[in-house]
Image (cartoon, grey):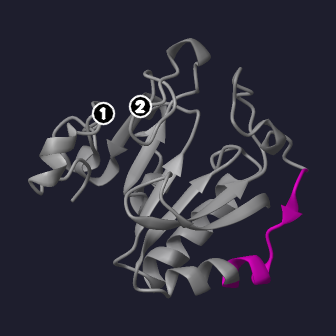
């Protein structure tokens, strides 16, 4: 696996403060993608032990909520096996941290994949420029979904995903009353 960056104290790619691994490799090549430099699976840097320790150093901090896998596409064939192994190691070492994953794939093609066992929240679907909305929570276009993976898998019909949160944050006055928008 190759990667482009490890972002620390990130608030834009999931609930709470997170560490984000931006992997290299994406076959979706969405028009208007925010990270076209990550499309090439041979781009970026080799993910090595030092990179893994950089992530673990962040996850050791009590205020870090978890890790987000983005890119690129963590489920690209060049990444999937290594991402799966890293997620399992993180789940074992940090059972209270959440794991988010962004992919251009859709839930209906993924819900039976064993890689989902270690994912808490999946943001699915290709970015569609015509459906771009900067006010959406945790996603870039209206077609994408922020899915509560474990709740979806536990329900009677896992083919129908359960959403982690609404598309938009509550009105400002709701926040002031202590109501949370996502997963809390």
Disc 2: which residue = 135
Q: Residue furthest top?
A: 130
- Give the image quarter of residue 21: bottom right
* Point 38% across, 64% down: residue: 16
- Is residue 45 covered in magenta? yes
Q: Residues within 10 Å of mark 1 (few under 14, many from 20)?
A: few
Q: In the image, 59: left or right of 50?
A: left
Horizontal and vertical percent position of residue 91: 44, 75
Q: Are marks 1 and 2 in contact (CB under 8 Å)?
A: yes
* Point 71% across, 44% down: residue: 72
| Secondary-structure class at tag 1 | loop
* Point 28% across, 47% down: residue: 153
Residue 72 position (above or below residue 31):
below
Q: In the image, 176: left or right of 137?
A: left
- Give the image quarter of residue 95: bottom left
* Point 66% across, 53% down: residue: 80
Q: Residues within 10 Å of mark 2 (few under 14, many from 20)?
A: few
Horizontal and vertical percent position of residue 56: 59, 83
- Magenta-drawn segment: 43-53
| Secondary-structure class at tag 2 | loop
Disc 1: which residue = 168
- Sequence-wise, which precedes: disc 1 or disc 2? 2
Q: CA distance from mark 1 to mark 2?
A: 7 Å
- Give the image quarter of residue 120: bottom left
């Amino acid at each position: 696996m190759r990667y482009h960056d490890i972002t620390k104290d990130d608030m834009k790619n999931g609930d709470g403060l997170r560490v984000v691994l931006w992997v290299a490799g994406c076959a979706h090549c969405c028009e208007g993608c925010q990270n076209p430099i990550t499309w090439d699976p041979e781009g970026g840097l080799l993910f090595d032990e030092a990179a893994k320790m950089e992530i673990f150093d962040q996850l050791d901090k009590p205020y870090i909520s978890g890790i987000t896998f983005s890119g690129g596409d963590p489920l690209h064939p060049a990444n999937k096996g290594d991402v799966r192994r890293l997620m399992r190691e993180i789940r074992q070492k940090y059972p209270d941290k959440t794991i988010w994953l962004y992919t251009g794939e859709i839930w209906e093609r993924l819900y039976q994949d064993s890689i989902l066992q270690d994912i808490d929240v999946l943001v699915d679907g290709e970015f569609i420029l015509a459906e771009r909305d900067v006010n959406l929570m945790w996603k870039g276009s209206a077609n994408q979904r922020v899915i509560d993976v474990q709740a979806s898998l536990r329900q009677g019909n896992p083919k129908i995903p359960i959403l982690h949160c609404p598309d938009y944050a509550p009105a400002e006055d709701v926040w002031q009353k202590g109501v949370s928008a996502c997963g809390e």
